[in-house]
Amino acid sequence: MSYRTLFDACQSLPLHVKRKPVRDTLCEITGIKLRIVKTTLDVRVCRGMYLSPRNTTHRIVQQVGGAHVVVMPREGNNHCWERFVEVKEYMHVLDSADEATDTGEQFDRLLAEFTTAGQFATSSQMTGEIKAFWRAMGALCPEHVRQELIAEKESRGADLTDLAIALRLKIPEQYVPNLFEPWYLENQGHLFDGRHA
Amino acid sequence: MSTQAEQARRRLFGDDGLRVSNFKIFPGTSREITAEQISKQVNQVVTQLEEGDFELVDAED
């Protein structure tokens, strides 16, 4: 049931890490099925969405066979963005009950946190969003590859650009600097311990 | 008339709605987005799912 299991499984995957083995591993360790759908979602407002319907009398639940649903836009995400957003949304199958958004009040709070600058406290639901981001980073960039990139960056300096790394990993260029943050492994470690597994 | 947020809350969490156990989003490209705009997208997505106006995808790569 843990992120650690997924992290370890991703270490042996060849680059670039593909979505299917990540999805399959998550489904295996959680027992949750995922269905990915494309709709007219407006990428200016929302790059992706995750929802886990449980009203068995509802038509959508019957259509997706009880699976959790990742909603992606038909247009607007390039390949790297689509991969990253989709994998980040997969990660919500690992959200704890505390991190799940399952009431209208929590929904309002989450949206307020996304749309209002300078919140004083982060809700458990937003913590779930942050964890999903770092879990996606950990899945799409195996740690041994990250260590190789750190070494390559030291030897090549500016010749190894964020864009080149992004194309190698097939993740958005703007997230590449996150891989080299001094606290990167600390963040991953937080996801391994008992409270965050 | 109810707001988009009210409708979204009802459709996601109401007794006659999806009764989701979890809902999350990945914010979009624009920095100037309101909760009403996100809620409108939620309502649109739920309608499309209800009407079968979606493609199931199974990306490998």
Image (spheres, grey):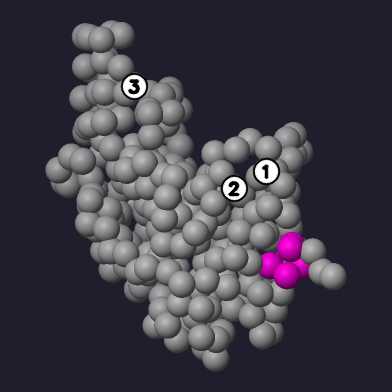
A59 to the left or right of A125 = left
Q: Are marks 1 and 3 on the same chain?
A: no
Q: From the top left corner, tell me how far across and down residue A190 is, in percent.
A: 46, 43
Q: Label 3 lies in what chain?
A: A
Q: What amino acid type should be assigned to the residue bearing mark 1? A: Ile
Instruction: Looking at the picture, tell me which residue is in the foreground, B26 or B41.
Output: B41
Disc 2 crowd rating (10 Å Cα; few below 14, some 14-19, many 20+) is many
Question: Do the CB atoms of the residues marked 2 and 1 lie less than 8 Å apart?
Answer: yes
Which quadrant is the N terminus of chain B positioned in? bottom right
Residue B22 visible from this viewpoint: no
Q: From the top left corner, tell me how far across and down residue A182 is, in percent.
A: 43, 23
What is the C-alpha distance between the residues marked 2 and 1?
A: 6 Å
- Specify the principal SS of the magenta part: helix
What is the C-alpha distance between the residues marked 2 and 3?
A: 26 Å
Q: From the top left corner, tell me how far across and down residue A2 is, in percent.
A: 37, 58
Write the residue at 21% across / 25% down. A148
To which quarter of the image does residue A102 belong? bottom right
Q: What residue is disc 2 on? A: A45
